[in-house]
Image (tube, coloured by chain):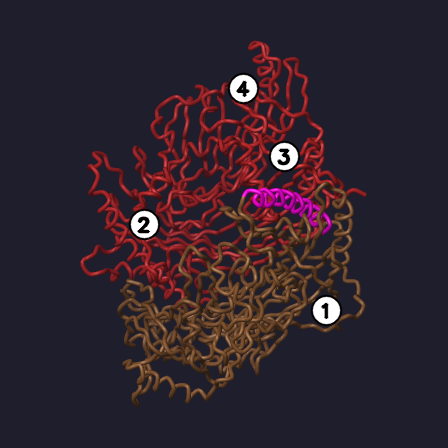
């Protein structure tokens, strides 16, 4: 109940564990409960274990998507509600169960696959038919679970027993989080004129050869129920606007910029006038970038400011603080290819990973940052576990990782971060107890350049989030060619996120804009080289790609919003590279935007 | 693999008004396409490697799709989108950037499609056309370099045909396609059609889908072709699945098509068909399993239609005669007998209906802007020509209007409406009598009657055996004596093409139509096939892949205990 007190967005009520049917305000939950009870009581193959854990989820949602280009509507799609049912049936026990095992065996039938992925259930309030779908999906899931557990045990027989085995499912105290069922009120189409106006900004910039402005919103209700007594009814609410634009410099280098604004509903987003102003700024900034000098390879002190710091943290830091556990696979080739790795920070819990003044927390309870709503905030995770605020780094020392109900060595309880199909952050905040003002931080940076006898340094002001900035209204053939060019151009090496806006700065503070830079190295090396941070912090929100740890939670609809709150960061040493993409010659035919 | 998708009934009937050859009224989108085409080509023609051909195709697609299961609506959605495909060719008609690169492991199907505004806003549409033309031109220049290298490093090519045929420009401006659907009414109808299946607790899947689609195509090319034509499509399918106690899954299908929602059969006929499916499902569950067998058989008209589509139709598609990886069964057989002398095979995309049945393979212009043509492929057993797109073959310099593709794919020669005609025909009853005498004369215990099919697939490559499979859903064992035909289960019809054709003995006197969607290199295209029932002196059947999954453990939820 402590959790329920602070959820705010939900009206949390606690109902008795066996509600009288006539008082049941959630007919879908009732249908789920009835079919689950039948399965728990009776579903059993002769001489095989009965399910020890069953979870059901239904996502009932409808949405709008509008995409505009240069003042014109390209996509205008409103979906009627869909209802998707997902099931997780496990046999075995908490210590060793049928989860986290992938089998490549396939039955030629279609029924054996039933319920492996989301099953559409009626849009009509036809509860008998809903239960029929749940029945078949549960039957399929149970039969698969029995086979998977047998295979998992067989695979384990060939190996030496693990002296310190980790359970497959954590034990948690059941919680009910029952919010209201709110009828969707989609407003996306009321935004069409605003979106057209935003995208029409690019008509004034003939050098920007591709741009799009899109809006998406989704509303509905998420129902979750498991055999331990967890129950969740809570709203599904996401809304966002995104602007992406590409240009080509005279030497062929492709330059891209983007921005996103996310909220739980469209009314939460900044007003249209502000989004329009941000679009104008983006367009002007991108056009100006074309004339910037090309940056150079550089290893040394770098100052990362504002949005750039929060995007960089989201890209390079957040994944390090998330627990994961590799599933086993019955196909040796696939196992070798998959090369699932243990979370890199697992063995460093208790160690110093940042300067003593730094702390990192994940605080799903944070609903507002300054005046802004925090889209990554949430109350219960995909498993129905109440979200906990977690201190990840205290006094520079790593304390723990974010974890759902799939335990890891030393991480045996969920801290309410089972999201998006694995463990995921919610509101990831970094701060320094010795934070300087942004101006002081810059002064300190320039001093550092002088002390080190550097001719120049780089201040990074905007970073591209590759997932969030991928344009959607493009030719798949071009997308395939672009990714091939990137692979061949970069020699296949992994690189960090591309830099959108950076300036070359001389020790006297003179700034010169540069283009074509990207963070070079793999993720965790820069962590150690952070030395100072600002007091001022910036929030950036992104939609995390579904987790890769199969078998950990099949009930997630896949996408989780993550908000990162980061100060400006001064790195003592970081590697920056000149982008190695093979440039495409600029078009010979002038743009039709040029009069 | 070239599956004819099961239960997909496609009707693609053009709602065309205007007259051919009439002066083209300026359509605003065509005007934008034409003027941006000219503006781009005027500059690009001065390049070192200029395009010799550019075309723009815009597909404007409006769709409605509704599905119900056991009396409840599962999905219901509307959609509308417009997408552009640009073809830029460099080189010349004889040898161009699309030439086959022999030995290439990375030859992906050319799929290229980009969304454009839904309204005729000139500048935003021009911006997409311009950028896409630039990218396709650059890609074509690169491709030409690759094919030139390939030519100089490999043995001399067997085929000396040009890469692109010269065709007369076409101009036709018809009205855009459209349809109207009463969504609420169709939702109610689908609930009623699928509700009865709930009476049988052993039917696990019972779904009916209604879909309507209007596709309007805008096409312009540097050769002067300018086309606007539309196609409206309505389908309704019912598919169910039951299981025998040994785990075998038994699917059954029925489907209908028409050019308008009102053209679909009346609801009482659909309900009656649904009842028939239920009865068949119940019989099939306990039907005996046929062991692998070879012997005489009759293929019903619908089965024979799929048989011809798979085994014959795919092997006379033009590009297979040129592709060095293809088995080229018929490439060198022009003028020779390839079928029994009593059979002729015609492809006729200009046919909207066969008898009273609408045909899915109807179109006025193909996807390369060539006018549809009736083509006699086999005349009294003799192979006359192939299905041709604008990729010519030696001795066949022109397209015969069969260059087809799903939106976004590069067109290749594909089937349209396949029609099998027979001069050695007899009433269906007589054909069954002939089957019985074949059974007797071959000393076989029984023959087979393939009554209905789900679809089929075939392999035409060289690296795997050149076999076909036809997947029947309803098969009967026919006895030479007076025992009635007996429903059986568990077999697929298999074989190799040349052997199969030589075994056709006689046909019935009435063709049946199969409408479907055919999938191959250039995506899914609607096709139809009409064939008489066939008596075949020898077919071979093999066991179907079988699910080992037992029946659901618990009974279905109690329907009487309503919430």
Crowd rating for badge 1 (residues with CA inside 10 Å; few <14, some 14–19, many 20+)? many
Q: Viewer-nearest of labels 3 and 4?
A: 3
Left or right: residue B174 compared with residue A372: right
Q: Earlier in the sequence, mark 4 or mark 2?
A: 2
- Which residue is farthest left? A47
Which mark, residue A83? none
SS under mark 4: strand
The earlier-in-sequence mark between 3 and 4 is: 4
Q: Which residue is mark 3?
A: A583
Q: Report x, y in % for residue B58.
A: 67, 58
Question: Which chain is represented by brown in the image?
Answer: B
Contact, mark 3 vs mark 1 (Cβ under 8 Å): no
Q: Same chain for marks 3 and 1?
A: no
Q: In the image, is B20 to the left or to the right of B550?
A: right
Please tell me whether residue A110 belongs to the stretch shown in magenta. no
Residue B177 location in percent, x, y?
67, 68
Q: Which residue is mark 1?
A: B174
> Which mark is drawn over residue A103?
2
Choose between A519 and A171: the one closer to the eye: A519
Q: Which of the 4 quarters of the picture holds residue A111?
A: bottom left
What whole-number distance in Å separates the C-alpha atoms at marks 1 and 2?
Answer: 54 Å
Tell me which segment is drawn in magenta: B125-153
């Amino acid at each position: 109940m402590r959790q329920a007190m602070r959820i705010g967005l939900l009206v949390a009520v606690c109902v008795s564990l066996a509600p009288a049917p006539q008082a049941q305000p959630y007919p879908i939950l009732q249908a789920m409960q009835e079919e689950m009870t039948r399965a728990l009581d009776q579903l059993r193959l002769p001489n095989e274990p009965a399910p020890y854990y069953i979870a059901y989820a239904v996502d009932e949602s409808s949405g709008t998507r509008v995409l505009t280009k240069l003042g014109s509507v390209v996509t205008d799609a409103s979906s009627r509600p869909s209802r998707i049912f997902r099931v997780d049936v496990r046999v075995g026990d908490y210590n060793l169960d049928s989860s986290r095992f992938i089998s490549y065996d396939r039955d030629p039938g279609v029924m054996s696959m039933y319920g492996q992925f989301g099953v559409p259930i009626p849009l009509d309030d036809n509860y008998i038919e809903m239960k029929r779908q749940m029945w078949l999906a549960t039957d399929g899931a149970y039969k698969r679970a029995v086979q998977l557990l047998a295979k998992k045990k067989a695979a384990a027989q060939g190996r030496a027993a693990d002296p310190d085995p980790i359970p497959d499912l954590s034990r948690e105290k059941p919680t009910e989080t029952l919010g209201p069922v709110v009828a969707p009120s989609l407003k996306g189409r009321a935004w069409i004129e605003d979106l057209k106006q935003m995208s029409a900004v690019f008509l004034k910039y003939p050098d920007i050869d591709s741009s799009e402005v899109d809006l998406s919103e989704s509303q509905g209700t998420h129902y979750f129920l498991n055999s331990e007594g967890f129950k969740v009814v809570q709203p599904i609410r996401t809304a966002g606007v995104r602007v992406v634009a590409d240009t080509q410099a005279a030497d062929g280098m492709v330059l891209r910029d983007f921005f996103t604004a996310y909220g739980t509903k469209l009314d939460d987003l900044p007003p249209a006038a502000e989004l329009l102003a941000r679009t104008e700024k983006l367009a002007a900034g991108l056009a100006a970038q074309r004339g910037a000098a090309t940056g150079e390879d550089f290893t040394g002190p770098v100052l990362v400011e504002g949005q750039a710091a929060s995007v960089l943290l989201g890209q390079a830091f957040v994944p390090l603080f998330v627990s994961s556990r590799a599933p086993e696979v019955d196909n040796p080739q696939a196992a070798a290819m998959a090369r699932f790795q243990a979370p890199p920070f697992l063995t460093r819990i208790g160690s110093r990973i940042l300067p003593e003044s730094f702390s990192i927390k994940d605080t799903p309870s944070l609903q507002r940052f300054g005046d802004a709503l925090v889209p990554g905030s949430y109350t219960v995770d995909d498993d129905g576990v109440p979200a906990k605020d977690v201190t990840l780094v205290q006094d520079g020392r790593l304390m723990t990782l974010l974890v759902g109900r799939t335990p890891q060595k030393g991480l045996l309880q969920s801290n309410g971060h089972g999201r998006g199909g694995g463990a995921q952050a919610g509101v990831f905040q970094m701060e320094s107890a010795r934070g300087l003002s942004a101006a002081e931080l810059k002064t300190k940076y320039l001093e550092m350049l002088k002390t080190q006898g550097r001719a120049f340094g780089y201040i990074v002001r905007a970073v591209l989030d590759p997932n969030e900035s991928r344009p959607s209204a493009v030719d798949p053939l071009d997308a395939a060619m672009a990714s091939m060019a990137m692979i061949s151009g970069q020699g296949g090496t992994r690189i960090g996120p591309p830099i959108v806006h950076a300036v070359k700065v001389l020790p006297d503070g003179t700034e010169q804009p540069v283009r074509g830079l990207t963070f070079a190295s793999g993720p965790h090396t820069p962590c150690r080289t952070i030395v100072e941070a600002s007091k001022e912090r910036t929030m950036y929100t992104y939609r995390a790609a579904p987790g890769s740890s199969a078998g950990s939670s099949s009930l997630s609809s896949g996408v989780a919003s993550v908000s990162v709150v980061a100060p400006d960061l001064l790195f003592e040493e970081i590697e920056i590279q000149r982008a190695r993409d093979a440039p495409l010659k600029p078009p010979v035919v002038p743009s039709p935007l040029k009069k | 693999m070239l599956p004819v998708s099961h239960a997909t009934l496609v009707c693609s009937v053009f709602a065309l008004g205007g007259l051919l050859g009439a002066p083209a009224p300026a359509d605003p989108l065509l005007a934008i396409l034409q003027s941006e085409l000219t503006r781009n080509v005027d500059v690009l023609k001065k390049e070192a490697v200029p395009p010799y051909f550019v075309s723009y195709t815009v597909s404007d697609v409006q769709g409605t799709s509704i599905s119900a299961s056991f009396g409840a609506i599962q999905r219901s959605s509307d959609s509308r989108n417009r997408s552009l495909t640009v073809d830029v060719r460099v080189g010349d008609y004889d040898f161009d950037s699309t030439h086959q690169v022999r030995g290439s492991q990375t030859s992906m199907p050319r799929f290229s499609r980009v969304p454009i505004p839904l309204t005729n806003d000139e500048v935003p549409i021009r911006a997409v056309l311009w950028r896409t033309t630039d990218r396709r031109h650059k890609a074509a220049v690169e491709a030409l370099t690759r094919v030139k290298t390939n030519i100089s490093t490999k043995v001399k090519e067997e085929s000396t045909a040009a890469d692109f045929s010269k065709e007369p420009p076409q101009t036709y401006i018809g009205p855009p396609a459209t349809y109207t659907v009463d969504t609420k009414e169709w939702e109610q109808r689908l609930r009623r059609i699928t509700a009865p299946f709930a009476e049988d607790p052993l039917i696990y899947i019972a779904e009916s889908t209604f879909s309507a689609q209007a596709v309007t195509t805008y096409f312009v090319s540097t050769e002067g072709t300018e086309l606007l034509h539309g196609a409206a499509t309505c389908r309704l399918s019912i598919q169910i699945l039951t299981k025998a106690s040994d785990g075998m899954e038994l699917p059954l299908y029925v489907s209908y098509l028409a050019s308008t929602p009102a053209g679909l059969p009346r609801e009482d006929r659909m309900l009656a068909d649904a009842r028939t499916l239920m009865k068949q499902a119940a019989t099939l569950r306990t039907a005996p399993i046929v062991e692998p067998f070879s012997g005489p058989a009759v293929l019903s008209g619908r089965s024979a239609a799929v048989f011809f589509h798979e085994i014959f139709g795919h092997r006379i598609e033009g590009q297979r005669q040129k592709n060095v990886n293809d088995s080229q069964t018929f490439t060198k057989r022009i003028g020779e007998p390839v079928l029994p002398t009593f059979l002729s095979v015609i492809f006729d995309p200009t046919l909207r209906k066969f008898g009273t049945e609408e045909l899915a393979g109807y179109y006025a212009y193909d996807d390369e802007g060539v006018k549809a043509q009736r083509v006699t492929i086999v005349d009294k057993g003799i192979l006359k020509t192939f299905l041709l797109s604008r990729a010519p073959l030696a001795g066949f310099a022109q397209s015969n209007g069969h260059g087809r593709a799903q939106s976004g794919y590069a067109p290749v020669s594909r089937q349209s409406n396949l029609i099998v005609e027979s001069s050695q025909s007899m009433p269906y009853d007589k054909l069954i009598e002939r089957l019985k005498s074949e059974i007797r004369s071959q000393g076989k215990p029984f023959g087979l009657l393939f009554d209905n099919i789900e679809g089929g697939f075939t392999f035409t490559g060289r690296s795997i055996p050149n076999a076909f499979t036809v997947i029947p859903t309803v098969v009967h064992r026919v006895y030479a004596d007076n025992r009635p035909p007996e429903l059986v289960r568990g077999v697929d019809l298999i074989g190799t093409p040349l052997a199969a054709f030589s075994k056709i003995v006689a046909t019935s006197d009435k063709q049946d139509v199969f409408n479907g969607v055919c999938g191959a290199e250039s995506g899914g295209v609607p096709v139809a096939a009409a064939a008489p029932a066939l008596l075949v002196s020898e077919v071979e059947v093999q066991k179907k892949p079988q699910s080992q999954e037992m029946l659901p453990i618990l009974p279905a939820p109690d329907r009487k205990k309503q919430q």
